[in-house]
Image: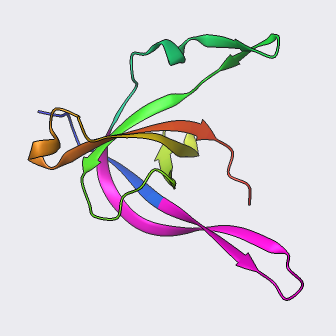
Amino acid sequence: MIGKMDSRITLMQKSVVRDAIGGETITYIDVKTTWCSVEKPARENDENVKMSGRQTAINEIDFVIRYFLGLSEDMIIKYSGVMGEKYYKIVSVNEEFESRRKGYIRLTGQKFDLEK
């Protein structure tokens, strides 16, 4: 079994609206709220990585959800966990995941700051 589908996430799609003088306003529209299993991947990326001469932590989380039509890597994930609401950019959609045939898919998200 995949684990408990005991967390809720919202998949969001970026929307760009242009005003009369050509300025852009970026918003995110909720596409789907679903149950998921949240897993911390055991990868090299979880280590502190040296970037530009300083230590930077790369925060990645795997979200296992039921597959749905319309899912794409350009969506973001809103996850409200113990530490509050966080946003994750989808960096991979793993359709080779062992439970795909059972209707599940693994999304790997990398934490980022949502610009309001």
Indicate whether 46 appears above or below 97. above
Q: Is residue 83 left or right of 93 when viewed as pictured?
A: right
Q: Is residue 24 visible?
A: yes
Task: Give the quarter of the image for residue 107.
Answer: top left
Pick the front one: 75 or 115: 75
Give the residue at x 55% y 45%. 89
Residue furthest to the bottom in view is: 20
Indicate whether 67 appears above or below 18. above
Task: Give the quarter of the image for residue 68.
Answer: bottom left
Give the residue at x 57% y 45%. 86
Q: Is residue 3 left or right of 108 when viewed as pictured?
A: left
Pick the front one: 3 or 95: 95
Give the residue at x 49% y 48%. 80
Pick the front one: 34 or 75: 75
Q: Is residue 49 left or right of 109 when viewed as pictured?
A: right
Q: Is residue 64 left or right of 102 when viewed as pictured?
A: right
Q: Is residue 83 visible?
A: no
x, y percentage for residue 81? 47, 42
x, y percentage for residue 4? 21, 38
Pick the front one: 82 or 12: 12
x, y percentage for residue 92? 43, 39
Quadrant holding the C terminus:
bottom right
User: Chief secondary structure of the magenta span?
Assistant: strand
Instruction: Count how many numbered circles sit on residues in the image.
Output: 0
Indicate whether 64 appears above or below 41. below
Residue furthest to the right in view is: 21
x, y percentage for residue 73? 46, 50
Which colour scheme appears in the figure?
rainbow
Q: Which residues are magenta?
A: 12-37
Task: Give the quarter of the image for residue 101.
Answer: top left
